[in-house]
Image (tube, rainbow, N blue to C red):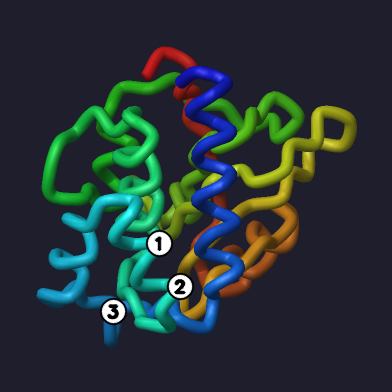
C-alpha cells in the first residue's frame, strides 16, 4: 500500500466520520441487500449519497474492504470480505501499535474467535506510545477510538486479543 493510497484511505475515513449519523449497521449483525448495494458504489456515488443526506449500511469489515477497494488495495475482489477474509490473506501479523501505519487493519477478538470479531483501520498513528486512533464501524455511526479503548471494550465483551496486518505489499 503506497503513501498516496494510505492518505486516500484517511480521506475516506474522514468522509464516513463526518457523516457518522448516516452510517447504518446491518440489523442483528446480518448483512442485507443494502450492504451488497452499497459495496458496489463508487467513491463518487458514495460521496454524493452522503452529501445528499442519504444513509448507507456496512458492517466493520465491509467498511474497511470498501475503503481498500476505492484506494486500489483490496486484493480479494467482490463481494466484500468478512473479518476472517482479512486474516486469511496471509499478511504478516504484529501486535505493536507503535509499528502501525496509517490505514493498517487491526483485527480484534482473535483469542476467542480465530477469524476475529471486529476490525478497524488506523486513522492516526502513534509511533511513540503505541496507541493509534482506530476508525471503527461496529454499530450505527462511525467512531475514532484509541486502540487501548477498543481493546478494553472488546475484552469486556468477551473478545480479547488483537493483531495488526502489514499491508505494505498490497
Residue under numbered circle 2: 51
Element marked by disc 2 = helix
Q: Are marks 1 and 2 in contact (CB under 8 Å)?
A: yes
Residue under numbered circle 1: 47
State which quadrant residue 148 falls in.
bottom right
Q: Which is more N-terminal, label 3 or label 2?
A: 3
Q: Are marks 2 and 3 in contact (CB under 8 Å)?
A: no
Element marked by disc 3 = loop
Residue under numbered circle 3: 26
Q: Residues within 10 Å of mark 2 (few under 14, many from 20)?
A: few
Residue at the image point whose x is 21% and y is 77% from the top: 30
**Label drawn at residue 140:** none
> How far apart are the two marked residues, 2 and 3, measured between alpha carbons?
21 Å
Left or right of 160? Residue 29 is left
Above-or-below relation of 54 to 149: below
Q: Nearer the viewer, residue 8 or 150?
A: 8
Q: Nearer the viewer, residue 65 or 49?
A: 49
State which quadrant residue 118 falls in.
bottom left
> How far apart are the two marked residues, 1 and 2, measured between alpha carbons?
6 Å
Amino acid at each position: 500500500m503506497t503513501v498516496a493510497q494510505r492518505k486516500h484511505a484517511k480521506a475516506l475515513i474522514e468522509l464516513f466520520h463526518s457523516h457518522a449519523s448516516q452510517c447504518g449497521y446491518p440489523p442483528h449483525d446480518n448483512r442485507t441487500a443494502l450492504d451488497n448495494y452499497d459495496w458496489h458504489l463508487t467513491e463518487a456515488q458514495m460521496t454524493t449519497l452522503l452529501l445528499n443526506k442519504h444513509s448507507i449500511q456496512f458492517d466493520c469489515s465491509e467498511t474497511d474492504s470498501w475503503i481498500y477497494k476505492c484506494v486500489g488495495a483490496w486484493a480479494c475482489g467482490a463481494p466484500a470480505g468478512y473479518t476472517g477474509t482479512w486474516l486469511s490473506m496471509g499478511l504478516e501479523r504484529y501486535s505493536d501499535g507503535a509499528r502501525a501505519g496509517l490505514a493498517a487493519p487491526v483485527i480484534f477478538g482473535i483469542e476467542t474467535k480465530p477469524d476475529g470479531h471486529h476490525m478497524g483501520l488506523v486513522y492516526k498513528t502513534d509511533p511513540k506510545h503505541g496507541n493509534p486512533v482506530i476508525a471503527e464501524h461496529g454499530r450505527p455511526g462511525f467512531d475514532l477510538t484509541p486502540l487501548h479503548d477498543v481493546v478494553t471494550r472488546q475484552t469486556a465483551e468477551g473478545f480479547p486479543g488483537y493483531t495488526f496486518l502489514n499491508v505494505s505489499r498490497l
